[in-house]
Image (spheres, rainbow, N blue to C red):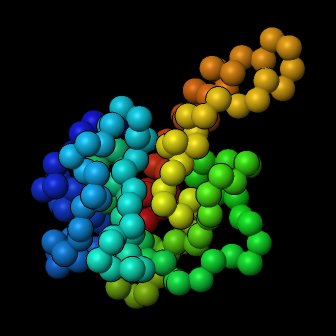
Amino acid sequence: MLPLTPATIRASFVNASRKEASDLTLPANFDSLDWDQLDFLGWRDPKLERRSYVIVPSLDRGATGVLFRHPGSSPRTRAQCSWCNDTTLPNDVVLYNAKRSGKAGKNGNTLGSLVCEDFQCSENARRYPKAWYEGFDREAERQRQIEELQLRVAAFAAQV
């Protein structure tokens, strides 16, 4: 992912008002982010408990920002993240809701997804998988995981 500026981040949101975008708090480690290890930038707002943000690289816009709202409850059973599809569940997965952009969002339409609670998907996708059989290409599988994560996140952002 290419490095982003705070101004670019605030201008990228497709489902947030200008006020919501200007009120966002950037992640605490923003200045030290390793952009090469990120497929998207996601964080929970430390000042607004139930608000989270995701910035997805986009060919047509440069970046697409999505404002999420957390309903405040977690699934009763351990869920699998629909973005990284990590089956080892190293972290909690929660349901995030995003208001759709445009007229649909103004009518109250939302889109939800089960996602790693603190958006650790890029980290999860970069872990080397088990060697399932002799000669299993772990690096190729790791690259496939990363590419599929990028596709799923971009598809979600496009639906918003």
Residue 73: where, in percent of width, then height? Answer: 59, 83
Q: Residue drawn 39% across and 67% down? A: 44
Left or right, residue 11 beside residue 144: left
Quarter of the image where one finds residue 67: bottom left
For image coordinates 58% across by 26% down, the residue present is 143
Q: Is residue 35 shown left or right of residue 113?
A: left
Q: Residue at x 35, y 85 (%)?
A: 106
Determine whether, in the image, residue 125 is placed left or right of residue 100: right
Q: Nearer the viewer, residue 21 or 62?
A: 21
Residue 55 placed where, x, y %? Answer: 34, 54
- Residue at the extreme bottom: 107
Q: Position of residue 87 (x, y in %)?
A: 74, 49
- Quarter residue 69 falls in: bottom left
The furthest residue to the right: 133
Residue drawn where x is 19% and y is 62% of the image: 10
Quadrant including the C terminus: bottom left
